[in-house]
């Protein structure tokens, strides 16, 4: 991709608020800058909404709700399918846009466009499969009919780390179910969401069904929407502390919520594991998105008999990685999202080293103007190290050991989080035991990536409530209503 491609892609992206089918400025006229983390340069300025803009977006979503719910499911499905086709057609441009605002490697951005688009295709297929049931009650005196209907207007709040997939994973099933939405993307990465919403409009989504507010005042804009009785659902992906604040706000009205929150994934390597596969899985689970993923492996727990060999092999691979701008060829690790993320990685490494961990490679800030941190391997991480409880969200692969399966499970579960776990073993029965004993919503058994549009993504414990994707994803946007009728054969 050339500088001309970058300029063309940036010139094409809308930068206003999208409310009731119209792009326009914020009421205040204010804008904010979006920066390329590889260079620190401003790539775009977008509208900076205030509370009045947020409520205007909710007005539009509430006004459009009844008509959108009444449209035949096949029509909603066709609109989503057109959006999927457009996403595929424009995959290269969307990937470049994502890399410019977020920093991830172009190849990974392409992967995210493919992954994110699948939620749109999946939802287009699910739109026509929403069904209820009909049955006889146990007493034989009546018939029960269970039907599903859209929840109503939704507020969808997304994080910066997967700017397309986190938006499609919410917007597509909401639309498929017949809900209208107000979307609030992260202020660090609003551009990809704006481009996706433009595609939805082009695909035929009617005015008011999808509305987007970009803002630097997330709390000021979202709280009045959450407290407004017209809103029927909040779906949030982000950190656990913000999720818990939003749950408190939502609880006052008993607002329905879905929460996709933080993770602290254990990555278990047993002594019977295929070590080649474990190393490949480890590199994927750790360095995808420079470790900035809720699913990133945070704690590598390795059986003491194979730990030295595992560390040697991953260190060889990590040492060979090249840091650089996500758009450049030959780069393996891009920048972190901002300077705070670099400072956090620096602090967590220093803390672990002060408690006895050994740096096998990396461990420091990268050079240049961007927000880089070297890909790092830490060995011998000791209990009490902060990175065992905090989300690292950086390219730091931290290894500690266990002696047997019981200890491995105890260490793995020793966290408030429960989003995903990874385990490498050749023993099938052990794999099944882990699925039953690890406190996690998802388990990657001998794989380093679990995300798939057809699977129910989500966590237990402080990692959240509800699921996105799979058969479960659309249910988050549907109400269950039940009807009792008399026995039609009774006189
Ligand atoms: P974050 O700081 O919690 O922000 C997430 C979103 O919430 C952003 O759009 C943010 O807006 C908004 N927000 C912040 N404060 C708010 C408030 N008071 N009211 C309403 N909205 C508010 O999280 P992040 O740093 O963007 O993302 C990283 C976190 O997300 C990590 O913890 C990661 O594990 C988690 N995550 C979870 C999943 C999952 O599926 N479980 C997936 C991806 C990421 P601004 O950014 O504009 O302030």
Image: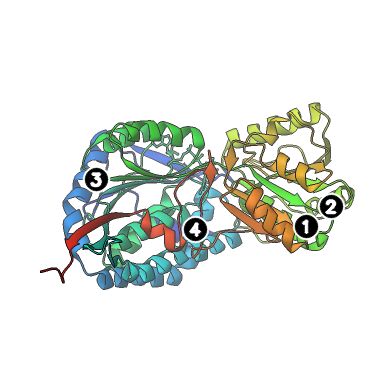
State the residue position of label 4: 456
Residue occupying image coordinates x 21% and y 39%? 229
Front position in the image: 182 or 240: 240
Residue 310: numbered disc: 2
Is any atom of residue 352 visible in this view?
A: yes
Secondary structure, mark 1, is helix
* Label 3, residues with CA under 10 Å away: few <14, some 14-19, many ≥20: many
Q: CA distance from mark 3 to mark 1?
A: 47 Å
Mark 2 or mark 3, which has the lower sequence index?
3
* Label 4, residues with CA under 10 Å away: few <14, some 14-19, many ≥20: some
Callout in the foreground (1, 4): 4
Does 230 sit left or right of 340 as displayed? left
Residue 279: numbered disc: 1
Mark 3 or mark 4, which has the lower sequence index?
3
Q: CA distance from mark 3 to mark 4?
A: 29 Å
Quadrant housing the C terminus: bottom left
Residue occupying image coordinates x 62% and y 55%? 443
Does 137 sit left or right of 11 as displayed? left
Callout in the foreground (3, 1): 1
Mark 3 or mark 1, which has the lower sequence index?
3
Residue 136, placed above or below residue 153: below
């Amino acid at each position: 991709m050339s500088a001309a491609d970058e300029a063309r892609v940036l010139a094409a992206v809308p930068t206003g608020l999208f409310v009731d089918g119209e792009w326009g400025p914020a009421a205040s006229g204010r804008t904010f800058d979006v920066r390329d983390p590889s260079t620190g340069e401003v790539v775009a300025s977008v509208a900076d909404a205030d509370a009045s803009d947020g409520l205007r977006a909710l007005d539009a979503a509430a006004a459009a709700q009844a008509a959108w719910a009444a449209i035949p499911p096949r029509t909603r499905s066709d609109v989503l399918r057109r959006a999927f086709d457009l996403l595929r057609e424009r995959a290269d441009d969307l990937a470049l846009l994502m890399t410019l605002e977020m920093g991830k490697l172009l190849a990974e951005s392409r992967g995210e466009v493919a992954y994110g688009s699948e939620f749109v295709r999946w939802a287009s297929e699910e739109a026509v499969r929403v069904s209820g049931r009909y049955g006889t009650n146990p007493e034989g005196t009546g018939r029960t009919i269970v039907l599903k209907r859209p929840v109503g207007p939704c507020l969808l709040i997304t994080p910066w780390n997967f700017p397309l997939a986190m938006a499609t994973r919410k917007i597509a099933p909401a639309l498929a179910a017949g809900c209208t939405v107000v979307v609030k993307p992260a202020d660090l990465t609003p551009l990809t969401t704006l481009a996706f919403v433009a595609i939805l409009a082009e695909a035929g989504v009617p005015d008011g069904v999808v509305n987007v507010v970009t803002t630097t005042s997330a709390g000021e804009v979202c709280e009045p929407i959450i407290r407004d009785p017209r809103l029927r659902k909040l779906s949030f992906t982000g950190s656990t502390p913000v999720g818990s604040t939003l749950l408190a706000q939502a609880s006052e009205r008993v607002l329905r919520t879905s929460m996709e929150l933080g993770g602290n994934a254990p990555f278990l390597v047993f002594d019977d594991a295929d070590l080649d596969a474990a190393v490949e899985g480890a590199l994927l689970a750790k360095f995808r998105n420079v470790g900035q993923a809720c699913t990133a492996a945070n704690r590598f727990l390795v059986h003491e008999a194979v730990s030295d060999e595992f560390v040697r092999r991953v260190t060889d691979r990590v040492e060979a990685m090249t840091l650089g701008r996500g758009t450049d060829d030959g780069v393996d690790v891009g920048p972190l999202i901002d300077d705070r993320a670099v400072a956090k990685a620096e602090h967590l490494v220093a803390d672990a080293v002060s408690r006895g961990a050994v740096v096998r490679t990396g461990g420091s800030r990268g050079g240049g103007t961007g927000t880089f941190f070297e890909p790092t391997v830490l060995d011998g991480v000791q209990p009490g190290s902060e990175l065992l409880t905090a989300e690292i969200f950086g390219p730091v692969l931290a290894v500690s050991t266990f002696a047997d399966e019981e200890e491995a499970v105890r260490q793995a579960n020793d966290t408030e989080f429960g989003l995903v776990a990874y385990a490498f073993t050749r023993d099938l029965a052990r794999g099944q035991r882990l699925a039953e004993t690890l406190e996690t919503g998802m388990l990657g058994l001998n794989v380093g990536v679990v995300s798939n549009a057809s699977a129910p993504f989500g966590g237990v414990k402080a990692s959240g409530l509800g699921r996105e994707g799979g058969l479960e994803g659309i249910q988050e946007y549907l109400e269950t209503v039940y009807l009792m009728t008399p026995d039609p054969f009774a006189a």
